[in-house]
Image (tube, rainbow, N blue to C red):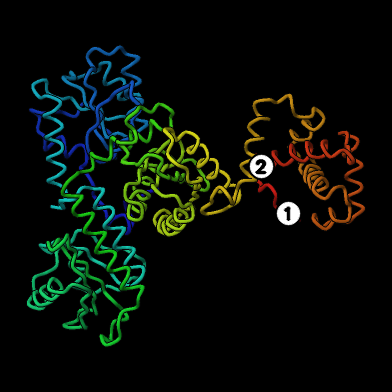
Amino acid sequence: MSFAITTTMAAAGIARGLPLDELVEQLGETVGRLRVPRNQGPRVLGVSYYDADTAEPPSPGHLLLLTSASVLPKQQLDAAFAFAAEQGHSAVVCKGVPEGDNALTEAANTHGVALVSLSVSISWRQLDALVSRLLAEYDSGLHLAPSASDRLFALANTVASVFGGSVAIEDHRRNMLAYSAMPGQAIDDLRANGILYRRTPDAPLNEIRYREVFASTGISRFSQQQGEAHRAAVAIRAGNIPLGSIWVIDPDGHDLDIPLSEEKQEVLTRAAILAARYLVDAWRTDNSSDRPREESFLRLINGTANQNELTTLGLRPKQFVTLAAVSSASHRLDAAELNDLRFAVHRHVSVYFPGSITITQNDAVLTLLPTGSSEEARRVFRQLLPELVRASAQEWRVGVGEPRRFSGTLTRQRDEAVGVLECARIRGLDVATLDEVRPQLVLLGCQGQLVDQRHLIDPELAALLDGDTARDEEARLTLLVWCEEQGNASRVADRLNIHEQTVRYRIRQLRERITLHPKDPDALLALWLQLRLHALGKGDEPGKKRG
């Protein structure tokens, strides 16, 4: 999966960051040299300092600064390079790496990680500043924090989904900050050129329109002129200060005497309010402000929180929060895929839940939403999934936990959201809430107990469960349905679409292998539970009527 090459994700910058070799070249040999190259490694997005004692969120695409490489024993050096490879860092940076083979180049080659040698005359803080300046210069003049930019692109897509036409969000100098990328959206040459050059072309007609938009307190509409499509526009303001504008191609706006629908008016007006908030926030902060919150979130779900987490997260005491988990429906994600998914999820949910936090852990993306409504969270994820499917050509699953008041730890809510996600995979649900899959969660809990306490499984039944022939599968299915239908051969036959005598024959054969107690409800429950958990482990849906 690579969201970076899709139209929806290209909006956030198809060329985010710099290739490692280009960055090292621009830094110059007096600053650093590439000792161990890596073909097609991730582009450099920033820098991170290595700390083996601190659990930090993954930073794919970052340079990992190994400040104490000269005093680390070989085993710890190996662990540092293994960490860099696992987390998808662009390269490891060490001071004064000599040419030729040595412990550092050996570790880099072993784990397939690029190695950069930093000049001993350059401080780590200087390197941090130099890299940040180069990345900022490369960023096409877009002076927004990445988090704010992500939200603007998601906002543009939201407006475009209602209007059916291309959307552009501009600053007060007419630089294009974000644009929509919805399949089938209406677009004209003026908008296409604006996207290409990231700026609206200067023209007499545009001057007139911009003056009208900024003079208006509401939505302005414009008819088709000089080959341009019909448009609607609204100013973005913070109080009386103009910050920019939103321009929408309106395929249905042929008759200006017919007012916009209430839905279009609401989405465009609300978009201007949200855009103003994001632009003002972008002036005050940069993306680094998210890092402490992500680290705090990670400590809370790992059970290692400190007393200041509430303040770091920006939450009120006893505030309701909802934790959700997102992952692939079919396979385990690698580090790069997880980072792409985290980027897409955060970009979307932060529009609807300002203050949300998104990190990766194990095989899933976890997001903390400041909301007390699981249905509201479910609706937002349902809006996101079609875009993820279009971008990656694969299916996704979301598990939404129960909203709970913040109580100083999120370990239980993490486990719950991941469990709901697993149940969503089993049942084939795109987005699942706790109420929808509670029975399956009970079964998962029982399955965990049986895995830990294998002696609880009936020895006679264990042989049947371990059988891998088609006949064993047929026997397990028949016995499971027989338990569910309380031994009624007629109903079992209907469920399995076989003859009633066939059911009786199979049960007689099963009685020769295991002891059945059809009149003992506890024995029947235990038998059914073990059969059902076996089906659950194979990916079958618990509770589904078969036949």
Please give the name of the residue rendered at 18% of the width and 24% of the height, measured from the top-left corner.
117
Q: Position of residue 165 (x, y in %)?
A: 30, 72
Mark 2 or mark 1, which is nearer the start of the sequence? 2
Quick check: 343 left or right of 333? left
Left or right relative to 117: residue 370:
right
Alpha-carbon span between mark 1 and mark 2: 14 Å
Residue closest to the eye, 496 or 158: 158
* Residue 437 on image: x %, y %: 60, 48
Which quadrant holds residue 352?
bottom left
- What residue appears at the point 24 percent right and 80 percent down from the top-left corner? 230
Residue 175 in view in this figure: no
Residue 536's label in the rendered image is 2
Image: 359 above or below 229: above
List the residue tagged with mark 1: 545
Disc 1, SS: loop
Residue 458, compared with residue 487, is above or below; it is: above
Q: Position of residue 82 (x, y in %)?
A: 36, 25
Residue 238 visible in the snapshot: yes
| Amino acid carrying mark 1 in the image | Lys
Position of residue 373 in the picture relative to residue 496 (left or right): left
Residue 204, percent across and down? 7, 77
The residue that appears at 78% across and 42% down in the rendered structure is 476
Residue shown at the point (34%, 33%) measured from the top left:
309
Q: Amino acid at mark 2?
A: Leu
| Mark 1 crowd level (few <14, some 14–19, many ≥20, 10 Å Cα) | few
Given residues 175 and 289, the one toward you in this image is 289
Label 2 environment density (alpha carbons within 10 Å; few <14, some 14–19, many ≥20): some
Q: Quadrant location of the C terminus?
A: bottom right
**In this picture, is 335 found above or below 106?**
below
